[in-house]
Structure formats: C-alpha cells, structure tokens
C-alpha cells in the first residue's frame, strides 16, 4: 500500500501487464499503418509514459507530437476541459492517432475531437491504454484499447492524484475499504435531510439527496428538471432509469469522498439492486441502511409545517403528502427486507430532539 497526499492506494496492474497491453496495441496499429507514416498525438500529462513505451514497441516510420488538456482537479472531473497545448502544425493529410492514457466518461475525448475537427487530416483514430467501458458515454468509437478496466480511481504509470504518483512504474487503485456508505431510510418528513446534514460533518461524508438534486435541476430549468417536475409535483416517484443514472453521476463527481450518505435513494427494488451493482463495480459497498421511524400523523404535521416556509409544492397539500406515503409503502418499504437479508438494516426512533436522534444514528455508525 502507498500513500499519496491523504489517500491510500493498493497495487492494481503490474508493469509487465501494462507493457504486454502496449505491445499488443502497437502490433494492432502497425497492421493498419506500417505502410504509411502516422502521426501519434499523445495527450499530456498522463500519457507521457505510455507514449514513450508505445513508441519503443512501434518500430515503423511515424511522427509524434503532444497536446495538453487539463480537466482533472484532484480526483474530480470538473467537466471543464482547457486546452493548454494546441494541435500540432502541418497535420493536413496525415493519419492522426490519438494516444490517451485513460478514457472514462468521454468528456476529455469530446474536447479532443473538437480540437481536431477543423483540421484536414486524412484519418483520425483514437487509442487509449486504459478504457473504463462501464462509464464511457460511447459518443465516439475507440479504435485501439490496451486494457479494459472497471471504474476504479487509478494512479501510476503517468496518472496522478493531485500531481503525485505519475512516476510509479505500475498502476495502483484507491483503497476503498475504509469507506462508510450509508443509506438513510424513512418516509418523507422523517428527518433524513436534517440528520444527513449533521452526519456528513461528523463523519466527513458526501451527502447525496436525490430530491435535492431534482429540485436543483428544476430550479435551473435543465432537461432532467423538466422531466422530473411533473412527477414530483404530484408526489409520484420519478422513473427508475432517470433516477439511477442521475445518482451514478452524483457519485462519479466525488471519487475522493470518504463515503456517501444516500438520502432518498434507493426508493424501489430496482434502485436498490442498481445501487449494489454500481457500488460493486467501483469496489465499494453499502455498510448500513438506517431507518428513521415515525408515525404518519406526526410526519404529515411536520411536512405541512415545512411546506409553509420551503415553498415545496409537494409539502403543501395533504393529499400529495399521503400519495408520497402510498408510494413509500408500496415501493420503498419492501426494501427493508432486501437490506435485512444482507444483515444491514438498522432502525432508529425518529421522534425526539434533533441532537438526540443524531446520537442514536451515531451509535449505529460507530458500531459498524
Ligand atoms: P424527497 O426530497 O426525497 O422527499 O424527494 C422529493 C421527490 O423527488 C419525491 O417525491 C420523488 O418525486 C422524487 N424523488 C426523489 N428521490 C427519488 C428516487 N430515489 N426515486 C424516484 N423519485 C425520487
């Protein structure tokens, strides 16, 4: 195990395995290009080591150049890609093969393709050493792949965590065993959001409330917001596909988190299964599902009170509130059994002073 800044990483892909994958790529590309002189364009900074070893394995006429993009801040893809080193000159009529260290969501790739879109190249191909097929948006075909890997955060062999780790000869992955991932379970008004606010500070966790993400999108008039609004206004659940994809995006945004509090998710069996599969693919898991219990009448009174100040349309009308309880009883309550079977279900009395309830939840978390 090695430590870079504040995080621990464990060995993941050995040097020999990386070099074998590069050799295989070089052979494949040579099959297609050995009779011409392709221009290999490495994407800095991450690809410098890959490009060096690739060229040693590609012993045919070729040219090499680099572009530099910057999209990562720490472990998080900000979604903003800057160009720092532009397209090489005189590339008209050439066959360009991009050499990327890793393709994950495809955001950087989009920018790269854009960068070359106004050039009159003969051909434009994309090669990547590592390929996270699970998260790739599939917008462009990837022509040459070294190794397909799951969506783990990796460092080494040119890849960094906040600039450290690029010089490591092998690839390491973030060690997730210390993570705490919690599901806060309970009916609308049970106090999940309030308690998540305290727990995230106390345990340094990232709080994801699907309700909040929907409301944020509605406020900003996004496509997702417009889609969700009609369901939310009636107190119905938003369809699973939409919610699951959104949740995954939220998790992807914070790979550096010490753990997550899922608030308002999962709410259906399909969501619970999708969450388990998704976390497993990232070498993560749910540690506990904690239910905040309270009677319906108490909750209705709380929600109507909250509706007076929050402006939430679904909190202002008792029939919509009751509809949300019906949705809960039908679709969400059965998840209790799902988590009980995994030995992860805990129940906490949600009536009392806020700090008393935080105390009850902390007891469960500390016992994990
Ligand atoms: P909440 O803030 O958690 O009470 O959520 C408000 C509304 O957002 C719900 O009534 C649903 O319409 C929608 N919503 C939030 N989370 C989910 C989810 N996991 N699945 C489906 N719909 C959801």
Image: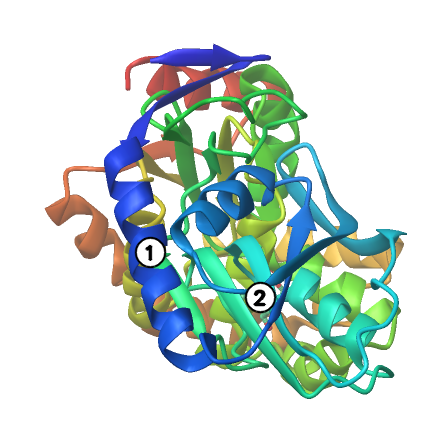
The residue positioned 59% from the left and 16% from the top of the image is 202
Looking at the image, is mark 1 or mark 2 nearer the viewer? Answer: 1
Taking the view exactly as shown, the residue that stands out farthest to the left is 341
Marks 1 and 2, the one that precedes in the sequence: 1
Q: Is residue 223 visible?
A: yes
Point out residue 81 in the picture as x, y percentages from the top left corner. Answer: 80, 55
Image vertical order of residue 58 relative to residue 313, above or below: above
Point out residue 263 in the picture as x, y percentages from the top left corner. Answer: 53, 48
Compared across the picture, whether 273 is left or right of 259 comes to left
Which residue is more in the foreground, 341 or 122? 122
The CB of the residue at mark 1 lies under 8 Å from ligand 1:
no
Mark-to-mark CA distance, 1 and 2:
27 Å
Which residue is more in the foreground, 324 or 159? 159
Compared across the picture, whether 7 is left or right of 189 comes to left
On the image, which quarter does residue 210 sit in?
bottom right
The residue pinned by badge 2 equals 246
Point out residue 352 in the picture as x, y percentages from the top left corner. Answer: 54, 26
Compared across the picture, whether 292 is left or right of 304 comes to left
The residue pinned by badge 1 equals 147
């Amino acid at each position: 195990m090695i430590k870079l800044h504040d995080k621990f990483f464990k060995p993941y892909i050995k040097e020999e395995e990386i070099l074998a994958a590069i050799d295989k790529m070089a052979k494949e590309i040579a099959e297609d290009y050995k009779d011409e002189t392709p221009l290999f364009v490495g994407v800095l900074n991450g690809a410098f080591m890959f490009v060096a070893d690739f060229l040693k394995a590609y012993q045919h006429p070729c040219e090499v150049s680099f572009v530099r993009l910057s999209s990562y801040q720490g472990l998080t893809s900000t979604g903003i890609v800057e160009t720092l080193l532009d397209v090489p000159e005189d590339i008209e009529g050439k066959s360009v093969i991009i050499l990327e260290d890793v393709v994950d969501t495809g955001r950087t790739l989009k920018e790269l393709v854009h960068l070359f879109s106004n050039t009159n190249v003969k051909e434009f191909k994309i090669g990547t050493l590592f390929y996270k097929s699970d998260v790739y948006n599939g917008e462009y075909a990837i022509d040459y792949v070294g190794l397909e890997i799951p969506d783990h955060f990796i460092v080494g062999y040119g890849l960094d965590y906040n600039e450290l780790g690029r010089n490591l000869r092998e690839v390491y992955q973030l060690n997730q065993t210390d993570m705490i991932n919690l599901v806060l379970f309970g009916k609308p008004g049970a106090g999940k959001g309030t308690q998540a606010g305290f727990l995230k500070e106390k345990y340094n966790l990232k709080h994801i409330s699907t309700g909040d993400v929907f409301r944020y999108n509605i406020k900003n008039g996004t496509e997702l917001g417009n889609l969700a609004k009609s369901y939310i206004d009636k107190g119905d659940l938003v369809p699973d596909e939409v919610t699951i994809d959104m949740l995954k995006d939220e998790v992807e945004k914070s790979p550096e988190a010490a753990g997550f509090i899922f608030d308002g998710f999962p709410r259906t069996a399909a969501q619970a299964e999708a969450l388990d599969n998704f976390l497993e693919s990232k070498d993560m898991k749910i540690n506990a599902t904690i239910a905040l219990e309270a009677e319906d009448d108490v909750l209705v009174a709380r929600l109507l009170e909250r509706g007076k100040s929050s402006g939430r349309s679904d909190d202002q009308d008792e029939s919509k509130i009751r509809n949300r309880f019906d949705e809960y009883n039908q679709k969400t309550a059965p998840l209790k059994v799902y988590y009980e079977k995994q030995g992860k279900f805990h129940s906490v009395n949600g009536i009392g002073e806020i700090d008393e309830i935080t105390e009850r939840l902390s007891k469960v978390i500390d016992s994990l």
